[in-house]
Image (spheres, grey):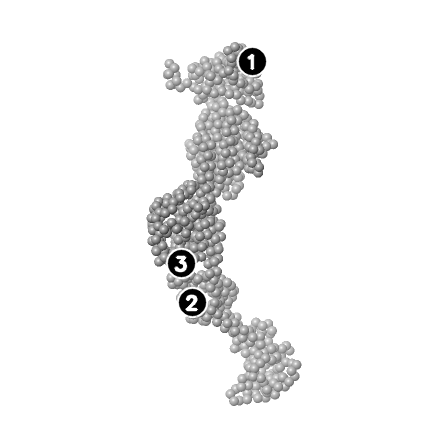
């Protein structure tokens, strides 16, 4: 023992820490050990020859010192001695008489060390006597030197004295446990409540889980001598936590998708490997289509197919029924009927499994190595949707009743999720069908542009959201390009889309300016919101982009109601975003719409789209537009059809359905050659009617359209006459020769021409009626100044000319 207090407090009691002294019958010290000198600070020369009582500290019992000095020393006890420094030390001592001699051998140690030793011994003895707490003491080589367990305890996983973990545990478990103990031995940092999986080296043994705490053992100078391990069997607690975790995972994963097949996959993925090694879910074919399953009870063709599989050992075995394959007919049996009514099939061992499958007349192949199985029907709202089965092939433990209860709970949740997905599939299918019927089946090619429109509905939990596109032929060979996106989802959004698309067609027939058309459309959406049920007014709205392209002027006029900007790919392959001034979305009201005019070179490709095309997980529209711009630069080439370009853009999503609808419209512009147009301007003089007729006749002769000269002259005569008589001048006249002959007469009046049937006694009123009879289409449109009345006449084909001759 050292003289310093700090060292004393850190001292570990051992035989080397016992102070000894030899005294004669008069209590005179004759021999003084080095340990005694360390304990009290007195050397042997200072103590030998003096009475041992000289070392005692002053005490209330004044006779104690005298007694010790007189040779009457108690056989054992505690006393207080004085250190050379003046402080006192409480010691516990024993006095041993040497044979028949009068000398006594005194043994002493600090009382606090003796107390620690006695308490430690009592604690170790008590712990080693426990049968619910395991104790292993390992030496520095991790060999067991002491244990309270008998060999074969803990399912044969307890090593005997002189053994090690590698002899009784699987290689992986032994390696993990020894690594943890070696860490404690090397660092001195204890391990507290570490869960250690214990699988015996004998594969038939059951897996256990221990709660393990380990502490380093040290000698008197602090060098490691081994590891003490205390552990309890935590298998039941671990299993309960695993089942709780499985419940939580099932609640999180199953039902997150509104796709029937995906829900079935989530179900088996949750079960494997957490509950078993092989699992499969079989669903009625009708359920996969969104319909209710047939109400079948008993055997026969159940019209089920394998919807999802999972295997913990690798790919799905080829010997088992593969995903997508139909189940074989089931022979009728009482067991099958009980199962169809909702009773779980539970077979925890090979014998009961074989007997149960035989009673069930199970028509399928059993997984190799299966020794325990559970199966349960998926029933929701009284409908048998299918079933799920799980097998144990690699895990040695059989299924327990708690596992069956857990599977029942998970299957109940899964059945509701499958039924929700089925009902959503049915509604989604109806919405998609309605949406596709409301969209144009084909996008027409005309003199103004070659077009391609593509639509892809949302899926996998998303809903149809009313995206649409349109290509609307206008007067004078112009064309309108439309794209829009309705707020909301499902059938209500689809119905709103249909109403808006009809309104756009109606307003487009009036040849309104794009800003005026959007203004009328905005008023319509506000009226629809006013008509909606209370609380649903804010759910009605839409974005829309309306563009009108004129192939004669090569000019496109664009207006936007809160929609994303269009892109244009020039003939040289460069793609850029058209800088537009978007107004508010439809239904907001109170703000004007702006018009943007852009000149397109022939062969330019205009791209209109909804946000589903550019939206990704980052939700950054600017990044999405830049990505689309780069894709168009790469994909949009003059030698590639617009359909192929559109499909390539859609292919960026792969097989994964988009989270939002996608509407995409591509238009490659065309131009009317300058020599195919002719225009004149006349003053407001009735005499110019003759000049107009003559000019038209000469131009038709140049174009080789003499067969249309007579009717065209009549049309021009009527329209110019009306303009001069009712509108004043100047009067503009333009002819456009393409796949039809277009005749336009422009005047400064905003009066709407009306077609009426003249009575026999009327002197006038037959002009527009005559025009309507001589042309295939006619109408009027308004500009910033005045109006234009236009007509179209079909060109006579060679077959028509031969028939007339």
- Percent across and percent down for residue 583 are 57, 33
Does residue 322 appear in the picture of this structure?
Answer: no
Instruction: Tell me the mark number nearer the camera, choosing from 1 and 2.
Output: 2
Q: Are marks 2 and 3 in contact (CB under 8 Å)?
A: no
Does residue 89 appear in the picture of this structure?
Answer: yes
Separation of marks 3 and 1 at Cα, in angstroms: 101 Å
Q: Are marks 3 and 1 in contact (CB under 8 Å)?
A: no
Mark 2 residue element: helix
Q: Which residue is mark 2?
A: 153
Q: Which residue is mark 3?
A: 398
Against 222, residue 461 (above or below) is above
Separation of marks 2 and 3 at Cα, in angstroms: 20 Å
**Rendering quarter of residue 802:** top left
The N terminus, quarter of image: bottom right
Mark 1 residue element: helix
- Percent across and percent down for residue 683 are 56, 14
Residue that appears at 50% across and 30% down: 501
- Depth check: give the residue in front, 74 or 541: 541
- Percent across and percent down for residue 297 are 38, 46
Number of other residues with Cα within 10 Å of mark 2, as a class: few under 14, some 14 to 19, many 20 or more = few
Q: Along the polypeptide, which appears first: circle 2 or circle 3?
A: 2
Q: Along the polypeptide, which appears first: circle 1 or circle 2?
A: 2
- Percent across and percent down for residue 465 are 50, 37
Q: Is residue 712 left or right of residue 25?
A: left
């Amino acid at each position: 023992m050292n003289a310093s207090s700090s060292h004393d407090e850190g001292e570990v009691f051992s035989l080397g820490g016992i102070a000894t002294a030899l005294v004669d019958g008069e209590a005179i010290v004759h021999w003084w050990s080095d340990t005694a000198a360390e304990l009290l600070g007195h050397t042997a020369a200072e103590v030998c020859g003096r009475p041992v009582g000289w070392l005692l500290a002053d005490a209330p019992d004044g006779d104690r010192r005298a007694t010790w000095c007189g040779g009457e020393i108690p056989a054992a006890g505690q006393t207080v001695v004085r250190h050379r420094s003046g402080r006192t030390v409480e010691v516990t001592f024993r006095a041993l008489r040497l044979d028949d001699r009068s000398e006594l051998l005194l043994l002493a140690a600090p009382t606090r060390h003796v107390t620690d030793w006695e308490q430690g011994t009592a604690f170790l003895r008590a712990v080693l006597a426990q049968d619910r707490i395991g104790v292993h003491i390992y030496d520095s080589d991790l060999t067991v030197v002491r244990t309270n367990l008998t060999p074969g305890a803990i399912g044969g996983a307890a090593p005997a004295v002189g053994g090690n973990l590698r002899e009784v545990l699987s290689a992986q478990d032994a390696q993990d446990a020894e690594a943890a103990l070696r860490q404690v031995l090397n660092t001195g940092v204890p391990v507290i409540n570490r869960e250690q999986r214990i699988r015996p080296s004998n594969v038939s043994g059951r897996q256990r889980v221990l709660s393990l705490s380990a502490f380093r053992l040290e000698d008197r100078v602090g060098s490691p001598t081994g590891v003490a391990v205390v552990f309890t069997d935590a298998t039941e607690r671990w299993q309960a936590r695993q089942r709780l975790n499985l419940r939580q995972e099932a609640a999180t994963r199953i039902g997150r998708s509104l796709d029937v097949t995906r829900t079935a996959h989530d179900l088996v993925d949750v079960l494997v490997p957490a509950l078993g090694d092989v699992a499969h879910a079989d669903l009625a074919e009708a359920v996969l289509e969104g319909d209710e399953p047939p109400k079948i009870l008993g055997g026969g063709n159940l019209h089920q197919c394998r919807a999802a599989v999972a295997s913990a050992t690798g790919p799905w075995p080829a010997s088992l029924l593969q995903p997508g394959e139909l189940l074989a007919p089931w022979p009728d049996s009482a067991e099958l009927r009980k199962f169809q009514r909702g009773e779980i099939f539970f077979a925890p061992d090979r014998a009961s499994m074989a007997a149960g499958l035989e009673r069930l007349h199970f028509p399928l192949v059993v997984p190799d190595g299966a020794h325990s199985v559970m199966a349960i029907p998926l029933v929701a709202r009284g409908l048998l949707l299918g079933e799920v089965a799980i097998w144990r092939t690699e895990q040695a433990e059989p299924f327990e009743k708690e596992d069956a209860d857990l599977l029942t709970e998970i299957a109940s949740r899964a059945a509701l999720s499958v039924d929700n997905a089925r009902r959503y599939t049915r509604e989604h299918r109806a919405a998609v069908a309605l949406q596709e019927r409301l969209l144009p089946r084909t996008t027409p090619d005309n003199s103004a542009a070659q077009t391609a429109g593509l639509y892809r509905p949302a899926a996998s939990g998303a809903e149809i959201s009313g995206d649409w596109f349109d290509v609307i032929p206008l007067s004078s060979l112009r064309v309108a390009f439309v794209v829009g996106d309705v707020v909301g989802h499902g059938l209500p959004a689809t119905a709103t889309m249909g109403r808006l698309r009809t309104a756009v067609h109606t307003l487009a027939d009036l040849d309104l300016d794009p800003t005026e058309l959007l203004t009328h459309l905005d008023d319509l959406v506000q009226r629809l919101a006013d008509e909606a049920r209370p609380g649903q007014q804010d759910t009605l709205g839409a974005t829309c982009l309306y563009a009108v392209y004129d192939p004669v002027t090569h000019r496109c006029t664009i207006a936007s109601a809160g929609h994303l900007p269009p892109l244009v790919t020039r003939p040289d392959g460069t793609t850029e975003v058209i800088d537009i001034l978007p107004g508010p979305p439809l239904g907001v009201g109170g703000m004007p719409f702006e018009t943007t005019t852009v000149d397109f070179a022939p062969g330019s490709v205009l791209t209109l789209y909804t946000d589903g095309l550019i939206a990704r997980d980052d939700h950054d529209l600017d990044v999405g537009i830049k990505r689309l711009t780069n894709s168009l630069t790469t994909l949009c080439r003059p030698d590639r059809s617009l359909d192929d370009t559109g499909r390539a853009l859609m292919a960026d999503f792969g097989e994964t359905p988009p989270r939002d609808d996608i509407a995409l419209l591509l238009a490659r512009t065309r131009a009317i050659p300058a020599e195919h147009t002719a225009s004149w301007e006349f003053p407001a003089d009735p005499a110019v009617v003759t000049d107009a007729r003559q000019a038209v006749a000469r131009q038709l002769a140049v174009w080789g359209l003499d067969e249309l000269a007579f009717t065209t002259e009549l049309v021009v005569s009527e329209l110019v006459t009306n303009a001069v008589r009712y509108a004043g001048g100047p009067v503009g006249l333009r002819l456009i020769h393409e796949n039809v002959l277009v005749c336009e007469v422009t005047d400064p009046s905003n009066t709407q021409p009306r077609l009426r049937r003249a009575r026999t006694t009327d002197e006038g009123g037959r002009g527009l009626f005559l025009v309507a009879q001589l042309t295939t289409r006619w109408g009027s449109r308004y500009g910033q100044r005045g109006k234009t009345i236009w007509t179209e006449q079909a060109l006579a084909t060679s077959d028509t000319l031969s028939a007339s001759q």
